[in-house]
Amino acid sequence: MEAVVYLLAIPLIATLLPLLSERLGRAIVPGLAFITASIATDMLLRGYTVSSYYFYADWYSMVLATTIAWIYFFASLASLYYVERVERPFYPLRLYWSFLSLFALSMIFTAVVSNLGWMWIGLEATTVVSAILIITDGKKRNVEGAWRYMIIASAGLGIAFLSVVITYSFAGTLDVRHLVLSEKAGAVVGLLAIVGFGTKVGLFPMHGWLPDAHGSAPSPVSAMLSGTLLPTALLVYYRLFKASTGLGKEAVYIALTVGILTVLVASILMASQRFVKRLLAYSSMDMMGVATIGIALSYYRPSLLKLVFVLIAVHAFAKGALFISAGSAVSRYGHEIGEINGLLKDSPALGYSFGLSALAVTGAPPFGTFLAELSILGVALSINRWWALLIGTGLLLSFLALNWHSAKMLFGEGKGAEFQRGEELIPLTMTLVALGVSLYAVYLALTGGLVI
Amino acid sequence: MINEILNLLGSVVLLTAFFMLTESYMHSLIDAVAFQSVLIGLIIGIVGWEKRIPELIILGGITIAFRALLIPWLLQRDVRKERIWRGREIKTTHHAIVLGLIVAVLAYFLYIPVYKATNDWSGVIAFVLLFLSMLIIASRRNALAQIVGYLSEENALLYLAVMLSPMPMVLEFGILLDMIAFVLLAVVLGAEKRYGPLEVEELVG
């Protein structure tokens, strides 16, 4: 039996057992999530890959699966505090624990299966499960956010399904190991795939659901949505992208255009945000735009792709820390950025976590995102300086927007809000993990493990 | 002969989509999507019969059972129970038919690159239906009408998959889509009872 099965079996147990009682869920889900994450890390470090009829996991899949498992672990820890704050649960909270595990399971499944059709099914499953998680707190805005998300994401996945059907009718198989498309089919599939899967990634102009869903979801769920769900959809897109660039460059230009537009639009939207969680949601959209550009440019420089996945991993931990600390802050101060003041004084741990993570997701050194963005800019510059100019403008704008808002929240007199110890430690740990991953990536880059 | 029957059924499917664009009474909107699902079920069954694929015949039966009988029945029950749905939808959609025609022509032209890639015209009706269904979802404001549009979109996807290339897993796809529709239903019908009919216009920013 393939070792990758463990990554699916343990979350499955964590899905089923909490159905018995909420208490059991609280007790076992974080533990099982930790075991999953440890196994995944071990497999990643040992360089485990698999290529069989059912499973296909290369280095990229394993990076993603490991990140998913760790974010799942941190989200389940943060949920211990979150469930206490739920005033009017939409359904019994034992279901929350079960769905949280199911969400992680469906993402890992999508990342490691070998069949494009099953990947599509996995993504569709993530939509349903995450929509249910969004309405945990049964307020009207949650239900509306979830509903808009369901409608837009399902419509997008409908188009994605179309790209899968055309791929099948052309390539005669859906096994990602053997996908090759001709030039004509490549352009059609590339366009449909970026519209379809791009909806789930949150790319412009299909991003309408993203701020509502991320803004109204429970903060641990936002962390998973933003840090891991968007990259999972991006990985599926990448598989099709790779098949459709076999002969022609059309798919590259399409991806590049959409990516650049996403970065520009997201950074402008970030600058004018009033609500903290929506600000973070647009920042995720921005990062996915950067990652899409990276994937497009990896056509010219294949080694760039590894850095894109470093960016995804660092972004996942830092954005998770941002969402979880924002969740704690929102429950004390309020939803608006203007209401949050002096976070650094009220809780130094949360303040440092928020400030550093904001720097991390906007690509400040020494974080891995800086390395990735610099290389993307470098490759873009070596091909066409206008691309580099546009990408650079977008990156600079988003850096200024997020860090300016974050500084407004961090500094100031403070309002004397008190936080629980664990609530402060979880995001701080995630920030430190992001830093650790970054330093490891820099070390690898210097010693030749990551070729740039 | 069989191709002619398929084309005839396909054009009736398109007509139901146009009907659904303008219909503002909720109960007849649901009847329309039920009728459309019967047609899609028949088409899938006929393709299965012609190509000797027993799975497709079963899929046709499942489509009729779930989407033409069970889901519409659930929706109708809800419409009857809640007084809000009795009247016609407040926001009527007179000009939707014009918009629908434009979208249909546009979808036809969008199919041309797909044709060039696959050398197959048989998916064009399903393709147009897909875009019309999206228009139904986009032009409606209440959740129940959007579910109807979503069901129609699912029908289009199944139809397209069957016409373009009967896939080995198409059966599973169909069942999965049905399950998703069920969850959608549960969520929305549950939410409605708390807040009244769900209108998706309030979120801004």
Image (cartoon, coloured by chain):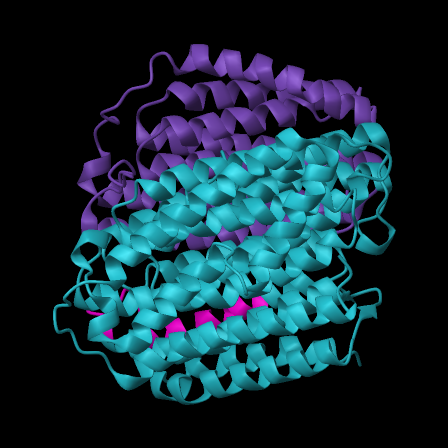
* Observer-nearest of B113 and A168: B113
State the extent of the magenta-drawn residues as a range. A85-106
**In the figure, the purple chain has which letter?**
B
In the figure, A34 relative to A264: above or below? Answer: below
The answer to whether residue B104 is seen in the rendering is yes
In the figure, A273 relative to B32: above or below? Answer: below
In the figure, A229 relative to B18: above or below? Answer: below
* Observer-nearest of A175 and B42: A175
Q: Is residue B204 inside the magenta stretch?
A: no
Q: Which residue is rendered at x = 33% and y = 13% of the image?
A: B94
Q: Is residue A103 inside the magenta stretch?
A: yes
The colour of chain A is cyan
Q: Position of residue A300 (x, y in %)?
A: 79, 42
A113 left or right, relative to A21: right
The image quarter in which residue A243 lies: top right
Q: Which residue is rendered at x = 77% and y = 22% of the image?
A: B115
Q: Quadrant of the N terminus of chain A?
A: bottom right
* Observer-nearest of B83 and A229: A229
Q: Which residue is rendered at x = 36% and y = 66% of the image?
A: A354
In the figure, A385 relative to B178: above or below? Answer: above
